[in-house]
Structure formats: structure tokens, C-alpha cells
């Protein structure tokens, strides 16, 4: 379960990887008092966690994921599994949003990803599911309205060009 959650993050677009990884840290802190667990470890155990200078592992390249794994290390196995189940669920909500963005050929917005993550952590999965669906519906509506305006503008430009052409033709006849 832990490996699955960690493996999902690098599969996401770069711009959202850190936001999802920060979800691990937020869950460790809010659900399991991760801050105090880190403080209770002592300098000899915690210093090596932050001094990973070789950065050989893929997740070391993403600072937020590296930090999240440090928090996971101090949790019990059960706590890790609980946090990772939630992160997999959050990633599912994010993937739904990304699929909608791809469908309408629009770039995802980091603020939407962060909002989905925060809603999940603060209000639970059901609220997050509703919120992300509403967000996607609004997004689709805005994209649709924007495309309609563009089409209307193109038609207007074509009509204006036709009127100019017709006016020129009428003018030349006289």
C-alpha cells in the first residue's frame, strides 16, 4: 500500500506531484501528530533524514515527496497504511480532474488540485468527491462558454469581412 501510494505520485504531471505529496505530510501531521513524532526522535535519528545529499532515489528529486517520506518513516505501519490509502484516494480525485482537463484540452490548475486535496483532508472523501465534480462541471461550463464566445467572435469577424467585401463590391458597381 505504501509503495503504491509513493509510485503514483511520479506518474502525475510535474505541476501536481508536489501538491499530492504534501497531502502525505498534511495527513501525517493532522491525523497522527507527525510534528511531535519527528521532534521526539532526537537529532541522531532525524538529521540523516534531512541530509540526503546523494539524492539517488527518484523521490528525492521532489522535495515535497522527500519530506513526506520522512514523515511516513516515523509513523507506525498501521498509520502509514491509513495515510497511504487516503493519498491513493486523493490521487484518484486528482486524476479525475486531470482527465477532464485533457478531454477539453486545457492545462490543469494547481489551485484546483490543492483545493481538492485540502477538501479531502479537512472534510473527508465524500465532500471532496462532490467538490471536485462541481469544480469540473464549472470548469467544463467555463471552457464551453469561452469556446462559444470564440466561435461567435469568429462568425462576427467572418460576417464583418463579408459585409466589407459586399460594400466594396457595391461601391465598385456605382
Image: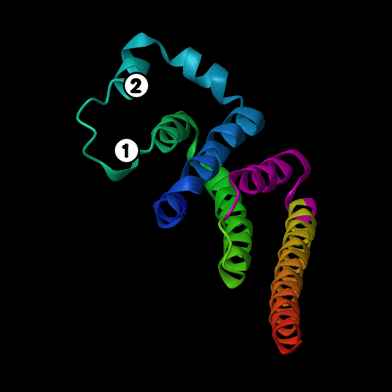
Where residue 56 appears, as percent x and y from the top left, is 21, 38
Residue 22 % position (x, y): 53, 36
- Residue 172 horizontal/vertical position (percent): 69, 84
- How busy is the neighbourhood of tag 1: few (under 14 within 10 Å), some, or many (20 plus)? few
Q: How is the image coloured?
A: rainbow
Q: Residue furthest front?
A: 174
Q: How far apart in space, not on screen, are marks 2 and 1 (Cα)?
A: 13 Å
Q: Which residue is mark 1?
A: 61
Question: Residue at left 46%, top 28%?
Answer: 74
Depth check, front residue: 161 or 102: 161
Quadrant hosting residue 142: bottom right
**For the point 73% across and 69% down, which residue is it?**
153
Q: Secondary structure at mark 1?
A: helix
Residue beneath the point at 74% across and 52% down? 128
Query: Can you give x and y, in whole percent of width and height, for residue 14 in the image?
Result: 43, 48
Q: Earlier in the sequence, mark 2 or mark 1?
A: 2
Which residue, given by chain and number where applicable, does mark 2 sit on?
50
Look at the picture and state if 160 lies above or below 7. below
Q: Quadrant of the C terminus?
A: bottom right
Where 115 falls versus 54 (above or below)? below
Q: Would you call the spot at circle 2 few (<14 residues within 10 Å), some (14-19), or many (20 or more)?
A: few
What range is drawn magenta here? 108-127
- In the rendered image, residue 4 lying in the magenta stretch gets the answer no
Residue in front for this viewpoint, 173 or 71: 173
Q: Residue at x 60, y 49 (%)?
A: 109
Which of discs 2 and 1 lies nearer the camera? The answer is: 1
Task: Answer whether labels 2 and 1 touch (C-beta < 8 Å).
Answer: no
Q: Secondary structure at mark 2?
A: helix
Amino acid at each position: 500500500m505504501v509503495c503504491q501510494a509513493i509510485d503514483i505520485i511520479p506518474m502525475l504531471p510535474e505541476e501536481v506531484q508536489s501538491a499530492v505529496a504534501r497531502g502525505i505530510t498534511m495527513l501525517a501531521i493532522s491525523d497522527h501528530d507527525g510534528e511531535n513524532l519527528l521532534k521526539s526522535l532526537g537529532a541522531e535519528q532525524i538529521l540523516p533524514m534531512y541530509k540526503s545529499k546523494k539524492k539517488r532515489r527518484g523521490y528525492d528529486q521532489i522535495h515535497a515527496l522527500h519530506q513526506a517520506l520522512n514523515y511516513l518513516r516515523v509513523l507506525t505501519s498501521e498509520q502509514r497504511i491509513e495515510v497511504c490509502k487516503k493519498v491513493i484516494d486523493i490521487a484518484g480525485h486528482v486524476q479525475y480532474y486531470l482527465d477532464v482537463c485533457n478531454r477539453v484540452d486545457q492545462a490543469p490548475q494547481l489551485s484546483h488540485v490543492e483545493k481538492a486535496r485540502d477538501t479531502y483532508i479537512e472534510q473527508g472523501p465524500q465532500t471532496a468527491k462532490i467538490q471536485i465534480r462541481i469544480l469540473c462541471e464549472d470548469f467544463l461550463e467555463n471552457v464551453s462558454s469561452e469556446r462559444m464566445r470564440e466561435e461567435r467572435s469568429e462568425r462576427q469577424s467572418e460576417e464583418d469581412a463579408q459585409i466589407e467585401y459586399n460594400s466594396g463590391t457595391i461601391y465598385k458597381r456605382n
